[in-house]
Amino acid sequence: MKTLNAVMCITGLSAIGFAQGASAPQVSPAEAKNHTGETVTVCGKVVDAKVGKYGIPNHGKPVLFYLDQPETDPVFYFVTFGTKTGGPDEAVAAYKGKSVCVAGKITQASGQPYIMAADRTAIKPKAEN
């Protein structure tokens, strides 16, 4: 009986470990709207950026980065913050014009899908094709 309990415990823990190690499915910025509420990775080129007007305590001003389509006709964006020393300009310099992948849960604001990437480890550079 002890052996059976041990095997069941190990099997259960293995499943948890594999689930945590699984990477989020990758979708294009245009497909993001179909994955609201899901945790995915969205990859595309940052073609536009907009610095928020007001700051958030302990974060500073948010920066919205638009992938594949500019702010005037957006399909997807992600939000992050600059460093304490560099501010929002540092974030713009880090990502604008570059291809990136952003992992996180997709939500929508005003009908536009986005990922809040306050932790910038969720943003990874993508090799140019």
Image (cartoon, rainbow, N blue to C red):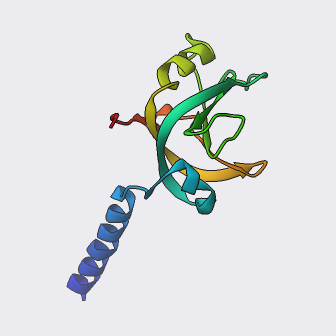
Position of residue 27 relative to residue 8, above or below, is above
- Can residue 24 be seen by looking at this rendering? yes
Position of residue 81 relative to residue 21, above or below, is above
Which image quadrant is residue 15 in?
A: bottom left
Position of residue 109 relative to residue 129, above or below, is below
- Can residue 37 be seen by looking at this rendering? no
Q: Which percent across, then down, holds residue 23? A: 38, 55
How many numbered marks does the figure carry? 0
Position of residue 7 relative to residue 105, above or below, is below
Residue drawn at 68 percent across, 21 percent down = 60
Q: Which percent across, then down, holds residue 45? A: 49, 35
Q: Residue furthest left?
A: 3
Q: Which percent across, then down, holds residue 102? A: 49, 42
- Of 57 and 115, which appears nearest the observer? 115
Q: Which percent across, then down, holds residue 77? A: 62, 40
- Of 45 and 115, which appears nearest the observer? 45
Which image quadrant is residue 87 in?
A: top right
- Of 83 and 38, which appears nearest the observer? 38
Quarter holding the C terminus? top left
Residue drawn at 49 percent across, 54 percent down = 40
Left or right: where does residue 73 sit relative to residue 28? right
Residue drawn at 78 percent across, 22 percent down = 53
Quarter holding the N terminus? bottom left
Which image quadrant is residue 127 in?
A: top left
Left or right: where does residue 34 sit relative to residue 27? right
Residue drawn at 69 percent across, 34 percent down = 71
